[in-house]
Amino acid sequence: MKKLMTLALTVLAISCSKPMIAAFGSNSEILIVTTPRCSEEAMKLKNILSREIVTVQYEPAFKVRIVTKADLRTELNRKNVLLLDYLSPESRLEGKIRDVVGQKFDELERGETYRYVVYDRWARGQAVMVVTAPTKQDLNRLLDEKADEIFNFVETCVQTRLNKALFYGGEQKVATKRLLDTYGWTLRLPTGYKIDETYASERVVKIMEDKPARMITVYWEGGQWSDESKNCLDRKRMLAWQYWDEDEVVDETLRIEEGEFLGHKAIVLSGTWENKKYTIGGIFVTYCFSCPEAGRHYVVDAAVFAPGLDKLPLLRELKAILSTFECKPRAE
């Protein structure tokens, strides 16, 4: 009898620990879950998140759908879910918001914060975001006055979710270790990406995936940089021209900003590139930073070539790969 009870408890434990299902849908889709009373505010938020971004064309930052709480049962496992409503009088969505934010609910109710995110809440590889305010008037003022801040919050949450979930479909772990052992730096690579080491003796390694084309370049050097911004742009132009068959930066689109890359102070370049020889182009982002442990400067570049397709989702994928960069401390 004791053995039978033990077996039954074991079976029960196994049945109660089923693995979480994978989130589904597009990486670039935001599902706004709201209530009928909040339809006006939901449309405001949709316009904030679907703003057009100039790449080599105009394209929406995100594809946005709006559903009411009544439809949530069939949508619960989407990749990017955003709960939107005000809290007083009591919201029909309040139970779900409480479920997501837990002890932070009191802060939302008092208006001390308006946003929250949790990952892997109802599905593996999911971001569930909350945007709310104490009253309808507060929520409308929030959407009017903090549109850019809300957009940046959602953009960061979507990128963070992708950084976590990108490798669920497979990873080249052997390649990751070999890059670290051979060059003193590494990236985690999803299945399908190829490494081109033709120019490794010149401290240039290229990583590529086709259809559509996604391209990463890693370059490193020692010494001192007297002008970080100028040196960064010079290296970017050199890499594009010499190692990508005469690609060029389109100066009219170039942005140079001070930022960070994985905790390192960085110069961040972004914009579009073109190749006049082949009449093609695309978008790019470049990070220039120092790794003191290795005694090196790094230029890590990501570029997209995808005629007829949205470029931003592909660039987000490359950013997720770049977020795994590691440099090995210099041997004493």
Image (cartoon, helix red, strand yellow):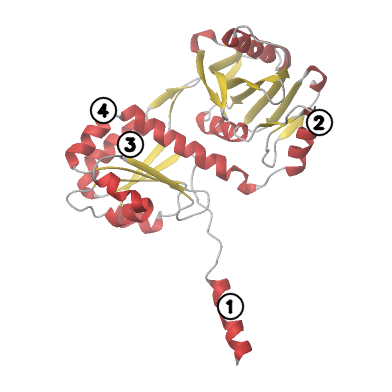
Mark 2 against mark 3, which lies toward the viewer? 2
Residue 226 image position (x, y, % from top left): 63, 6
Marks 3 and 4, Cα distance to the nearest angstrom? Answer: 15 Å
Q: Which residue is mark 4?
A: 145
Tell me which corner region of the image, top left, top right, bottom left or bottom right, holds residue 223: top right
Quick check: 42 above or below 261?
below
Q: Which residue is mark 2?
A: 182
Image point (73%, 16%), residue name = 221
Query: Which amino acid type is shown beneath numbered disc 1?
Result: Val
Secondary structure of the residue carrying tag 2 is helix
CB atoms of marks 3 and 4 within 8 Å: no
Q: Earlier in the sequence, mark 1 or mark 3?
A: 1
Residue in the foreground of this view, choosing between 279 and 98? 98
Q: Which residue is mark 1?
A: 11
Image point (58%, 72%), residue name = 14
Marks 2 and 4, Cα distance to the nearest angstrom? Answer: 50 Å
Secondary structure of the residue carrying tag 1 is helix
Mark 3 against mark 4, which lies toward the viewer? 4
Q: Which residue is mark 3?
A: 46
Q: Is residue 117 visible?
A: yes
User: In which quadrant is the C terminus drawn?
Assistant: top right
**Mark 1, other Cα within 10 Å: few <14 / some 14–19 / many ≥20:** few
Q: Which mark is residue 183?
A: none
Q: Earlier in the sequence, mark 3 or mark 4?
A: 3
